[in-house]
Amino acid sequence: MMNANPEAVFNAYLDAFSERDFERMRTTLSDGEFYYRSPVNTHTDADVFVLDISRVGQILDGIERRRIFVDGDEVCAILTFKIRINVVTLYPVVLWAKIRDGRIFSLESFFDATEYIQMFPERSGE
């Protein structure tokens, strides 16, 4: 993905994530410097991030792209995550990604974590 534009890299990440193809998702992330932050987690290692998100990703039933904004090497997206436990629930999420050399090296996720923390109470201290 060295020559891919930032939006294409970001969309490849979202496609792999929504398809729960975590191995392919990992190829969109930097092998070197990496930073992830959300209301419930922070990671500085892409492999650890993928391992963590793959556990949670099992309840992901799809990602709706509502709007994607591109500014140079940065991509910000307003999304709806479809989460299935007993029924499908829709969660608004904003992702902000920074791309360098065709890979995501910084990813921040913004969402209301109240229900997430209730689903995974053991994670609330992270």
Image: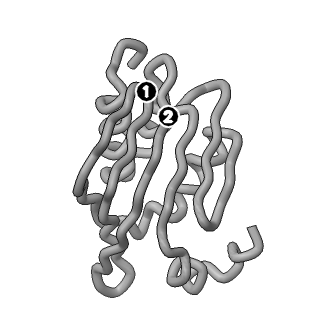
User: Horizontal placement of 98 versus 4: left or right?
Assistant: right
Earlier along the polypeptide chain: callout 2 or callout 1?
A: 1
Classed neighbour count for the residue bearing mark 1: other residues with Cα under 10 Å, few (<14), some (14–19), many (≥20): some
Q: CA distance from mark 2 to mark 1?
A: 6 Å
Q: Can you tell which mark lies on residue 107? A: none
Dividing the picture into quadrants, the one containing residue 11 is top left
- Are the residues tagged 2 and 1 within 8 Å (C-beta)? yes
Quick one: which residue is furthest to the top in this view? 3
User: SS at mark 2?
Assistant: strand
Dividing the picture into quadrants, the one containing residue 80 is bottom left
Where is residue 100? Give x, y as percent.
51, 22
Is residue 25 or residue 81 the one in the foreground? Answer: 81
- Identify the residue shown where x is 64% and y is 41%: 35
- Identify the residue shown where x is 30% and y is 69%: 82
- Identify the residue shown where x is 38% and y is 81%: 85
Quick one: which residue is furthest to the front in this view? 71
Quadrant of the drawing holding the N terminus: top left
- Identify the residue shown where x is 50% and y is 34%: 98
Classed neighbour count for the residue bearing mark 2: other residues with Cα under 10 Å, few (<14), some (14–19), many (≥20): many
Where is residue 117? Give x, y as percent.
60, 80
Where is residue 41? Give x, y as percent.
65, 60
User: Horizontal placement of 107 versus 73: left or right?
Assistant: right
Residue pointed to by mark 2: 98
Residue pointed to by mark 1: 73
Q: Amino acid at mark 2?
A: Lys
Q: Amino acid at mark 1?
A: Asp
User: SS at mark 1?
Assistant: loop
Quadrant of the drawing holding the C terminus: bottom right
